[in-house]
């Protein structure tokens, strides 16, 4: 995911595309007020991004101070070097299993955050989901339970 307007802006992305050999014909010329420039730049970045891994793009963007961030999978997050380095994940026991779960969202030395690492038991939120998300009334919930539907 690239956020072009911030940081070095479009010029930083044009320089990156140029240095990587992915500057498309006419893109640089259209940078001066052409209303089609954002679409051309997005297309050129998409084409370039398809040629690299997320890790490589992230590293190269950081070196250039460009606002690019990977769209991570759960596996990516579980293996993330920065999250591991700050002991983000906690190991907890829940429902007879040992799980790695997220901890607190920030580590603050002067005012440490408490919490994180909590795992609700399976089904702990079922009633709320059936009521608030599915719109079932208390009477409908009781009937479905009595009938063995839920």
Image (cartoon, rainbow, N blue to C red):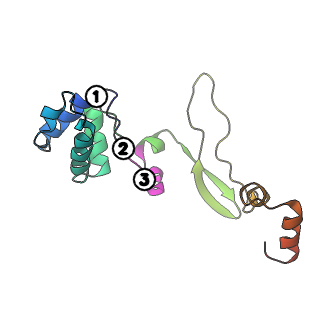
Q: Disc number at residue 121?
A: none
Q: Residues within 10 Å of mark 3 (few under 14, many from 20)?
A: few
The mark nearer the N terminus, 1 or 3, is: 1
Q: Which residue is mark 2?
A: 1
As displayed, is residue 144 above or below residue 111? Answer: below
Element on which disc 3 rests: helix
- Which one is nearer the viewer's eye here, 69 or 145? 145
Q: Residues within 10 Å of mark 2 (few under 14, many from 20)?
A: few
Query: Is 78 in the magenta?
Result: yes
Q: Residues within 10 Å of mark 1 (few under 14, many from 20)?
A: some
Q: Tell me what residue is drawn at x 22 percent, y 42 percent.
A: 40
- Which one is nearer the viewer's eye here, 130 or 70? 130
Where in the figure is residue 19, as x and y percent of width and height?
13, 37
Q: Which residue is mark 1?
A: 9
- Which one is nearer the viewer's eye here, 36 or 23? 36
In the image, which residues are magenta?
70-81
Q: Check the picture and name the quadrant holding the C terminus.
A: bottom right
Element on which disc 2 rests: loop
Where in the figure is residue 99, as x and y percent of width and height?
60, 57
Q: CA distance from mark 1 to mark 2?
A: 14 Å
Numbered-mark total: 3
Q: CA distance from mark 1 to mark 3?
A: 28 Å
Q: Quadrant of residue 144?
A: bottom right
Q: Tell me what residue is drawn at x 65 percent, y 53 percent.
A: 92
As displayed, is residue 6 above or below residue 91? Answer: above
Query: Is 65 in the magenta?
Result: no
């Amino acid at each position: 995911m690239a956020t072009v307007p911030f940081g070095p802006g479009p010029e930083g992305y044009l320089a990156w595309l140029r240095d990587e050999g992915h500057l498309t014909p006419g893109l640089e010329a259209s940078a001066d007020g052409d209303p089609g420039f954002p679409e051309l730049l997005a297309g050129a970045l998409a084409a370039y991004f398809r040629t690299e891994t997320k890790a490589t793009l992230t590293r190269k963007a950081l070196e250039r101070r460009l606002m690019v961030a990977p769209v991570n999978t759960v596996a990516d997050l579980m293996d993330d070097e920065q999250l591991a380095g700050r002991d983000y994940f906690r190991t907890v026991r829940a429902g007879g299993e040992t799980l790695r779960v997220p901890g607190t969202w920030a580590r603050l030395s002067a005012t440490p955050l408490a919490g994180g690492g909590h795992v609700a038991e399976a089904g702990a939120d079922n009633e709320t989901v059936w009521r608030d998300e599915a719109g079932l009334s208390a009477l409908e919930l009781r009937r479905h339970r009595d009938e063995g539907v839920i």
